[in-house]
Structures are given as C-alpha cells and as structure tokens.
Amino acid sequence: MRIAVAARARFRCEYCLQHEDDAIQSHHVDHIISEKHDGETALHNLAYSCNLCNWMKGSDVAAYDASGRMLIPLFNPRMDSWDEHFGLQFGEIVPLTAIGEATVRLLKLNTPQRIAERESLASCGRYPRT
C-alpha cells in the first residue's frame, strides 16, 4: 500500500510538494482522516507526506481561520486540487482559498527555513517553479 500511495504522489509530499529524495527522512503515509476519527487505512484516505507536514498535521482535519471564529477543513489531497488552493511564489506556498490558508497556517508551510529550502531546491530544478 505504501508503494501505491508514494507512486500516486510521484514521491512528493502532497501538502508541500517536497520530493522524498530531497528529504532527510523518508516520507510518511498519512491518514487524511486519522484512525482516531475512524478514518480507514485505505487508498482513498491516505496521502504521502513529508515528516514535517505529517508531524504538524497530526490527527487534525480542520483549523480555525485567522479570526478564530470559523472552523475550516484542511486540504484533502484525495478530494481537493492543490493548484486550486495554493500557488507558489519564490519558495512561498501562497494560499488561494480559506482551505489553503488554514492548511498553510496549521502545517507551518512558510517558515523562513522551509521557504529557503524550497527556493534552494527550485534553483537546481528539484522543486516546482512559480
């Protein structure tokens, strides 16, 4: 099952797009809806995730918006299109929707270190360009 999930994702984290070959640790198979919340261990509920995204996401399926008043679902790689919810701008993952914003904030996708790493990888053709 791990090979099927990894191949479907082209060995990239389905949240931040980092290729597994560029990661210090192997990517994880993430339950989009965690087992804790009765999520199945089945291909339709699994995503390929780098260590950082997997750790930040944990068992969460939603996050509050910036105002703290509205609960927003997180990006679901099986149901949502990455390009609809995110854009790339010089190593920064730019949220385009409320789902994108909640996911970027919860997964801490734009820390200075993560942006610098993506810029460096993009400069040598190892990460998608803007």
Image: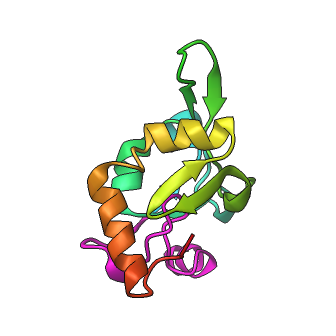
Q: In the rendered image, is residue 15 in sight?
A: yes
> What residue appears at the point 57 percent right and 38 percent down from the top-left corner?
101
Nearest to the observer: residue 28 or residue 103: 103
Q: Quadrant of the C terminus?
A: bottom right
Nearest to the observer: residue 29 or residue 110: 110
Residue 54 in percent (x, y) is at 40, 53
Specify the quadrant of the image occupied by residue 50. bottom left
> What residue appears at the point 66 percent right and 59 percent down from the top-left corner?
82
Q: Is residue 30 left or right of residue 119?
A: right
* Residue numbers of the magenta segment: 1-28
Q: In the rendered image, is residue 59 in sight?
A: no
> What residue appears at the point 63 percent right and 17 percent down from the top-left corner?
70
Residue 31 in percent (x, y) is at 53, 52
Nearest to the observer: residue 90 or residue 10: 90
In the image, residue 112 lies in the stretch drawn in magenta: no
Residue ranking furthest to the top: 69
Specify the quadrant of the image occupied by residue 25. bottom left
Vertical side of 119 occupied by 67: above or below: above
In the image, residue 4 lies in the stretch drawn in magenta: yes
Q: Main secondary structure of the magenta part?
A: loop
